[in-house]
Amino acid sequence: MTRFKPTLVGLTTVLCAVGIAQGLMITTDHLRTLDFPPHAKFHAALSGLYMVSHSVFLLLLVWGPLMRGGRGAIHSLTFALLALPAFPLVAMAIVPSGIPPSPYPTMAATAFASAVWGSFLAWKDGGSQG
């Protein structure tokens, strides 16, 4: 993976920075909201911490095994990169009445489209090498 590695690393790093910021925002904002019952706060903390940990995992993967050309790194990155924005989109489809306010759905859809494009470029350029 030579030609598109910088693009994939850059795209993943930006998506992870957004994921970490969004996860921290979800966790802190929802925990401070007095109207939220304890169970809702639990789920907000769970989802926010999930986003942060998933983003950190992706950063470790892209700056570690992927940069070194580790076997299977592109496969792991593709799954993780697509899953990060896909899970919120699936949750929005399952519970449409619980969709967060705008611009969150647009951000999730844009992140998913970017992840699909970055994964396509990586697989096209060198998926068989990793």
Image: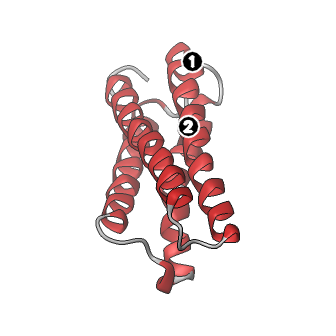
Along the line of sight, which residue is nearer the eye, 123 or 88? Answer: 88
Which of the 4 image quarters holds residue 128?
top right
Q: Provide residue 9's location: percent of width, then percent of height.
A: 40, 27
Q: Quadrant of the N terminus?
A: top left
For the view shown, which residue lies furthest in the front direction?
Answer: 34
Q: Is residue 46 above or below residue 91?
A: above
Asked if 102 appears above or below 97 in the picture, the reply is: above
Report the amino acid beneath label 2. Leu
What's the mark number on residue 10?
none
- Is 26 left or right of 5, judged from the image as shown? right
Q: Dot 2 surroundings within 10 Å: few (below 14), some, or many (20 or more)?
A: many
Q: Residue at x 53, y 74 (%)?
A: 35
Question: What residue lies at 49% left-to-right and 45% top-to-bottom?
Answer: 24
Circle 2 is placed at which residue position? 77
Q: Nearer the viewer, residue 112 or 91?
A: 91
Q: Is residue 76 above or below residue 46?
A: above
The colour mode here is secondary structure
Q: Is residue 82 visible?
A: no
Across the whole image, how many numbered discs are drawn on residues? 2
Residue 73 in view in this figure: yes
Q: 126 or 94, which is in the foreground?
A: 94
- Report the Cα–Cα distance between label 2 and label 1: 11 Å
Q: With 17 as the anchor, is 45 left or right in this view?
A: right
Q: Viewer-proximal residue, 18 or 118?
A: 18
Judged from the image, the secondary structure of the residue bearing numbered disc 1 is loop
Tell me the element at label 2: helix
Q: Residue 17 location in percent, x, y?
A: 40, 36
- Amino acid type of the residue tagged 1 in the rendering: Gly
The residue singled out by tag 1 in the image is: 64
| Image quarter of the C terminus | top right
